[in-house]
Amino acid sequence: MDPAEAPTSWKDLLGERWTGKLGIAQAGAGGSALALTRFQRDVLGDEYLREYAGETRVFDSLGAELDSLARGEIDAGTVVVSSVNIAANENAPVTFVVPDEGVTAYDYYTGVASTATHLAAAKVFLNWNLSQRGQNVLRDIGEYSVREDVAAPNVRGVQLPDFDDPRVHRITPAEATAWSEQDQRAWNAIFGYNE
């Protein structure tokens, strides 16, 4: 796609130009898909989703959607920044934009298993993961840091908004628990998706 034609807002993805050329992973594909659904319902509304659903191809997973995007089978999709960055590092012809209306953020969880056989190594890795250096590595692939001393991601020349920017819509664990079942049911009905 010519960069001049790239969408800059979620609303740019509506219309005949995108029919059959959009992708989205089904809402039950994981935490990022459910976070996206919550953002879309909250910020863009169900009517937006109905219009989007009429023009899009639904994938069972984000990985399958990203593969289709990399092969040129779709022109745009709702994918995770870090996955796009990793695919681009493998020479896939993909990039991402930060839509005017915003982006989603969701929590990753980390810890040490109670049955870990190499507890010291697990703790070293966990400490590194949460260190400034470890968080910078995650930021460099496109993820937000849990640390205040690590800046927002800038990936492939695209600056993501600061975490406290109103365009960043984080779904908290409590919100995910409260809304996930209802959001998935609504999404399935809107997209005509039968698990």
Image (spheres, rainbow, N blue to C red):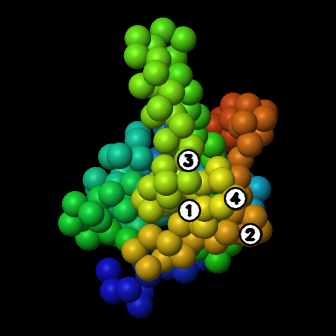
Nearest the viewer among 140 and 123 is 123
Position in image of residue 78 (x %, y %): 48, 58
Q: Earlier in the sequence, mark 3 or mark 2?
A: 3
Q: Secondary structure at mark 3?
A: loop
Tag 4 residue: 148
Q: Secondary structure at mark 1?
A: helix
Q: Earlier in the sequence, mark 4 or mark 2?
A: 4
Q: CA distance from mark 3 to mark 2?
A: 23 Å
Q: Earlier in the sequence, mark 1 or mark 2?
A: 1
Tag 1 residue: 52
Position in image of residue 48 (x %, y %): 66, 63
Label 4, residues with CA under 10 Å away: few <14, some 14-19, many ≥20: few
Mark 4 vs mark 1, foreground winner is 4
Q: Amino acid at mark 4?
A: Glu
Task: Find residue 131 and name its label.
Answer: 3
Please tell me which residue is depicted at 51% across the width and 27% down the height of the picture.
Answer: 123
Looking at the rendered image, the quarter that the N terminus falls into is bottom left
Q: CA distance from mark 4 to mark 1?
A: 36 Å
Mark 3 vs mark 1, foreground winner is 3
Label 2, residues with CA under 10 Å away: few <14, some 14-19, many ≥20: few
Q: Earlier in the sequence, mark 3 or mark 1?
A: 1
Position in image of residue 50 (x %, y %): 62, 57
Nearest the viewer among 123 and 194 is 123
Label 1, residues with CA under 10 Å away: few <14, some 14-19, many ≥20: many
Please tell me which residue is depicted at 56% across the width and 62% down the height of the picture.
Answer: 52
Tag 2 residue: 165
Please tell me which residue is depicted at 57% across the width and 43% down the height of the picture.
Answer: 130
Q: Amino acid at mark 3?
A: Ser
Nearest the viewer among 19 and 80 is 80
Position in image of residue 186 (x %, y %): 67, 41
